[in-house]
Image (spheres, rainbow, N blue to C red):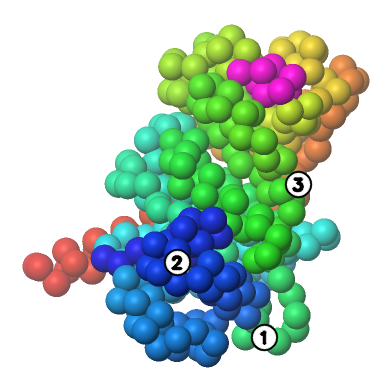
């Protein structure tokens, strides 16, 4: 399979152009066609020579994804199921926020982190996405708006879809540099958030990258016993290691860390656990933020249910009284396959059922 041209950063594209014996400015022309004019084919790059166009067509594709399913919610959320060149499926979600259009991208096919409440982990990791496949998700969502001619643009990106971004580190970093490039999509670094389940060594590495992208950590429990029971990653990176890395990140970057906390009824949502969480964060309260997330039930994980509002509010009030910055996340797309990975999982089940019926 040919790689996607979206997989190169601008510097990498410039290096490739020079290696082909072309002038370096050709890379800037191509970059402009890709991300400013957002053409859909090489043939539309009308200021390039025919030999260069032929070379591009021979060695690359533009967008390697094809659209399989689109679900639109009454609240404006759009969930896409994309098919990769090898037939595998991924999800991307567009959310309308008061501050702009935010896209949640996927970084892996499946997930090996093994959180017991998560739809993404129902199917084990098949492979990493390359940088071009991650960038292409943004480009296809932007195409969705370009075709409507209303001038809307993707303004925010969260790397929180299927997979563990820091388990696909180099491809994710290339993706971040590409969408942040000021001569391209120019999505501001502070409008981009990367979420990790807690790969402590990669948090340290990320701290040294010198980029202003936001960091979120999927925490979901205030102590090791509980966290290990619902997130097996905690056995490799217990809270002591995780928070040592977070402390290094904060001291290195002087940037705030967001903690994601899914509210699971009578599992992690008690007042005592809120007090434990406040104590865990006591030394970094000024540079941390807790995002309380309503749980989207997953059929295969029927041991969990959504925390009722009174338990959520008691948890929230306890954190606030302890001086912890926190918010209850606004829900999006509750009338479609809301949980991350759910659309993909449900579609694969339907496809398998169809195949079984044909083979009967």
Which residue is more in the foreground, 162 or 58?
58
Q: Would you say 216 lies left or right of 303 here? A: right
Q: Which residue is mark 1?
A: 148
Q: Secondary structure at mark 1?
A: loop
Residue 190's disc is 3
Q: Please tell me which residue is depicted at 32% across the width and 71% down the height of the picture.
A: 59
Identify the residue at horizontal 71%, vertical 60% (top origin). Answer: 182
Q: Which residues are magenta?
A: 245-252
Residue closer to the observer: 208 or 28: 28
Crowding at dot 1, Cα within 10 Å, few <14 / some 14-19 / many 20+, comes out as few
Distance in Å between CA atoms under marks 1 and 2: 34 Å
**Residue under the point 16% across and 64% down:** 356
Q: Secondary structure of the magenta portion, mostly?
A: helix
Please tell me whether residue 228 is drawn above or below residue 80 in the rendered image. Answer: above
Q: Earlier in the sequence, mark 1 or mark 3?
A: 1
Quote the CA–CA distance across marks 1 and 3.
27 Å
Q: Classify the position of the N terminus by image quarter.
A: bottom left
Q: Which residue is mark 2?
A: 17
Q: Which quarter of the picture shows residue 53?
A: bottom left
Give the quarter of the image for residue 38.
Answer: bottom right
User: Total label count?
Assistant: 3
Q: Give SS at disc 3.
A: helix
- Measuring from the top left, give residue 263's x and y in whole percent: 65, 33
């Amino acid at each position: 399979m040919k790689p996607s041209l979206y997989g190169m950063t601008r510097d990498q594209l410039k290096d490739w152009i020079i290696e082909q014996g072309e002038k370096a400015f050709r890379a800037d022309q191509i970059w402009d066609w890709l991300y400013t004019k957002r053409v859909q084919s090489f043939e539309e790059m009308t200021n390039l020579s025919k030999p260069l166009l032929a070379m591009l067509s021979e060695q690359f594709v533009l967008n390697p994804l094809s659209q399989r399913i689109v679900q639109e919610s009454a609240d404006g959320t759009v969930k896409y199921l994309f098919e990769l060149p090898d037939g595998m499926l991924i999800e991307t979600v567009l959310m309308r926020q008061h501050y702009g259009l935010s896209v949640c991208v996927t970084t892996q096919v499946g997930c090996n982190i093994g959180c017991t409440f998560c739809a993404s982990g129902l199917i084990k990791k098949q492979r990493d996405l390359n940088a071009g496949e991650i960038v292409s998700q943004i480009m296809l969502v932007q195409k969705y708006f370009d075709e409507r001619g209303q001038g809307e643009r993707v303004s925010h990106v969260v790397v929180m879809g299927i997979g563990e971004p820091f388990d696909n580190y180099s491809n994710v970093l290339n993706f971040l540099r590409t969408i942040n490039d000021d001569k391209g999509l120019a999505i501001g670094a502070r409008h981009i958030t990367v979420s990790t389940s807690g790969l402590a060594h990669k948090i340290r590495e990320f701290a040294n990258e010198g980029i202003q992208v936001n960091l979120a950590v999927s925490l979901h429990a205030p102590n090791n016993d509980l966290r290990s029971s619902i997130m097996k990653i905690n056995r490799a990176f217990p809270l002591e290691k995780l928070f040592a890395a977070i402390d290094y990140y904060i001291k290195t970057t002087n940037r705030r860390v967001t903690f994601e906390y899914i509210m699971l009824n009578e599992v992690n949502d008690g007042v005592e656990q809120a007090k434990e969480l406040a104590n865990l964060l006591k030394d970094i309260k000024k540079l941390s933020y807790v995002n309380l997330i309503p749980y989207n039930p997953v059929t295969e994980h029927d041991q969990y249910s959504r925390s009722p509002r009174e338990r959520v509010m008691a948890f929230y009030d306890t954190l606030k009284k302890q001086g912890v910055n926190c918010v209850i996340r606004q829900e999006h797309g509750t009338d479609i396959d809301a949980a991350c990975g759910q659309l993909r999982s449900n579609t694969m089940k339907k496809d398998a059922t169809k195949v079984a019926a044909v083979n009967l």
